[in-house]
Amino acid sequence: MMCKEESNGHTSASWEFGLRGKKSLRFDSKNRNWTVLHNEGTLLKKTLARDRAMTYLLIRTSVGDCRKWLKEVLCPQDEILSTKDASTTATATVPSKARTKTPIAWWIYPVIFICPIILGILG
C-alpha cells in the first residue's frame, strides 16, 4: 500500500500487486480503478475486480491506515522550516517525535487467505 497526502490535505492510497518480482497490478482506492502494469496482472485484475469484499477491504484499509500513518509520520506544519530570515542565535537540535507504527497482524490474514486462491487460479 502506498499512501500520499494531496495539497488539499486529503489522503489517497494505491495498492500494488506483484507476480514473480514484477509489479503487475495497481488498485487506486480513491477512484476504485484497477490498472494492469504487466501482462501477468490481467487475470489477477479479473479475479480481484469481481471480488467486492476484497475491493471494500482495500478501500477501508486505505482510508483508515493512510490517514493514521501519514499523521504519525509527517511533521506538523508548525515544525516545517520557514523561509524567514535566519536567526543569529544558535538553536539546539531536538530529536524528532515522529514515530511509525506498522500494525501488520490485522491485515495479513486476508492476504494469507487470498494468496492460495490467486495461486490456484493462476496455476
Image: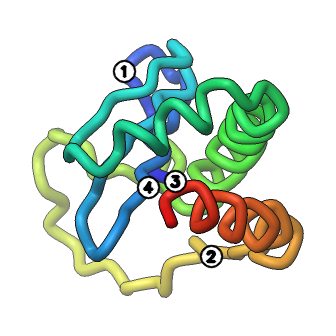
Which residue is labeled 2 in the image? 99
| Number of residues whose C-alpha sits closer than 10 Å to that of mark 4, classed few (under 14), some (14–19) or many (20 or more) | some
Residue at 16%, 40% in the rendered image: 83
Q: Identify whether 90 is placed above or below 70.
A: below
Horizontal side of 22 relative to 50 (left or right) equals left
Q: Are marks 1 and 3 in contact (CB under 8 Å)?
A: no
The residue indicated by pointer 1 is 7
Image-based side of 41 in relation to 78, left or right: left
Q: Which residue is mark 4?
A: 17
Q: CA distance from mark 2 to mark 1?
A: 22 Å
- Hey, what amino acid is under mark 3? Met
Mark 4: secondary structure? strand
Q: Which badge, 2 or 1, is on the more N-terminal residue?
A: 1
Amino acid at circle 1: Ser
Q: Which amino acid type is shown beneath numbered disc 2?
A: Arg
Quarter assignment of residue 117: bottom right
Question: Measured from the top left, where is residue 85 in percent x and y?
Answer: 11, 45
Residue 100 percent location from the top left of the image: 62, 74
Which disc is residue 1 wearing? 3
Label 3, residues with CA under 10 Å away: few <14, some 14-19, many ≥20:
some
Q: Earlier in the sequence, mark 4 or mark 1?
A: 1
Quadrant in which residue 43 is drawn: top left
- For image coordinates 53% across by 48% down, the residue present is 76
Residue drawn at point x = 74 percent, y = 31 percent: 51
Circle 3: element type: loop
The 10 Å Cα crowd at callout 1, few under 14, some 14 to 19, many 20 or more, is few
- Disc 2 to disc 1: CB gap under 8 Å: no
